[in-house]
Image: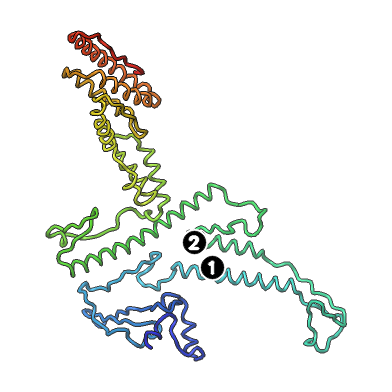
Amino acid sequence: DFIKRISGSGSGDENSDEDILVRAQKTCDGVTHSSNDDTIVLWEVYERESKKKTTVHTISPLLPSEDVREPFDLPYDIKKHPFVDFPFEKMGKSYYSARGVAELGASFQSYLAKTWNGKSDAMDLWNNPPLSAQKDVPITQNIRVQPGTIIPFPVAPISLAAPPIDWDQEMSNTRTLAEQVFAVPDFAMGEKGFDPKKKPDRTATETQYIATITNMVLDARSQTWRRSLFKLYRLSWEILKEKDNDPAYLRSSSFAELPDGVQEKVRSLRPSGSAGQWNRTARLQNAIRRKMMFQGSPFVKQNELDKMCLELDEAGLVERMYQDPGIEQEQQTSAQMMEIPALLEGMPVATNEKDDPFLHAGVILQFLTNAATKQQQVSPEAHQSMIAHLNAHVEKARAANPKQINKMLADFQKINDHINQQQAAMAVAQGMRPELTPAGGM
């Protein structure tokens, strides 16, 4: 029965005065009650009985007079309550200090509501004006003016003067003033009001200045939020240091232990990054601008610029897409070296679309250079197979960078001539007719 009384919106006599009062006080779903019957809202109330003792009470806002569990003493010796407030703005030390955003906004909201209600009342009055009878009517309560009603005496509507103000313009002015006070842009009706033919009064320069001031105010509020986050970090660290004598932390998907004596040396914990970390779109734009500004600079790590753009675009893209150029070059070189044994046997090896033609051609060229330097004999079949495989990579490389491949071809021609001379000398020594291998497309 107790669980039923504190679940959801609670249970009780819906017609009793007490229940009506309680329902009127339920103005925030999730704080004082819940619209879900399977949800129980609980509060922890901290009662400071003395400087060294704080008692914690667990209650339900639906039944504040009954404890959900037995009260207990605060189990921390940090001499402060284990929670931190996150104010929207910086005010006085009191939670009820004047000139807060809520207090300032209440006046604008009340005036807008009053103006809107006045406009609605004026519309009712103009659409249903009072009538003037041309003769005395003894009992006016018997007259009902409705569509299709026949009135037995002549009447005339009373002419009403024009309203002293433009209702729509007054509401638009109020919204504009509130926008400037709170530094939060209102992108609804704005300066146009309800007249689509009216041109905007603000220029592009004024709009830019307003956006700049708005960003400055949002940055200041972000700083206020980060100060509260700093307090929360510090409070969490004090509780951790008190309750855990050997804390471990997670870094790079593995747990590590803190060195001895580090806990006592920690003086402050601050959130990383800047106050504008919440604006992911602006951070991505800054990262792209930084990439374009420092591209090719020898003083800036180029790979970190690429990583920053990927991780701000979508979390996890660095692990999925980023690859170090050195690793890619090693993989391409290893792939071509694994094809050389088959080429030495005179077997044809097809090229792959993912192959880097310059790296693959360079590996074959380096192999032939080493063979010529060490005077290692290369069979005519192996030489022809390598030339055919090399020509396939050269065609792709020529389409990408003709100058670079032409230099490689000049070096290869010298090596190819040397190998042809070796093969001719070997053929003469064996009493056979020499068969030279042309450079082909090289």
The answer to whether the residue labelled 1 contacts the one labelled 2, judged by CB atoms less than 8 Å apart, is yes
Identify which residue is drawn at 58% across, 57% down: 190
Viewer-closest of 103 and 63: 63
Q: How many marks?
A: 2
Identify which residue is drawn at 59% across, 56% down: 191
Q: Badge 1 is on which residue? A: 108
Q: Badge 2 is on which residue? A: 181
Vertical placement of residue 318 versus 66, above or below: above
Is the residue marked by circle 2 packed among few (<14), some (14-19), or many (20+) residues within 10 Å?
Answer: few
Viewer-closest of 127 and 213: 127
Q: Sequence-wise, which precedes: disc 1 or disc 2? A: 1
Does residue 356 appear left or right of residue 415 in this picture?
right
Residue 294: numbered disc: none
Viewer-closest of 360 and 122: 360
Please state, as top left, top right, bottom left or bottom right, where the N terminus lies in the image: bottom left
Residue 125 on image: x %, y %: 72, 73
Identify which residue is drawn at 87% across, 81% down: 153
Quarter of the image for residue 174 reads: bottom right
Viewer-closest of 388 and 434: 434
Is the residue marked by circle 1 packed among few (<14), some (14-19), or many (20+) residues within 10 Å?
Answer: some
Q: Label 2 is placed on what type of residue?
A: Val
Secondary structure beneath dot 1 equals helix
Quarter of the image for residue 58 reads: bottom left
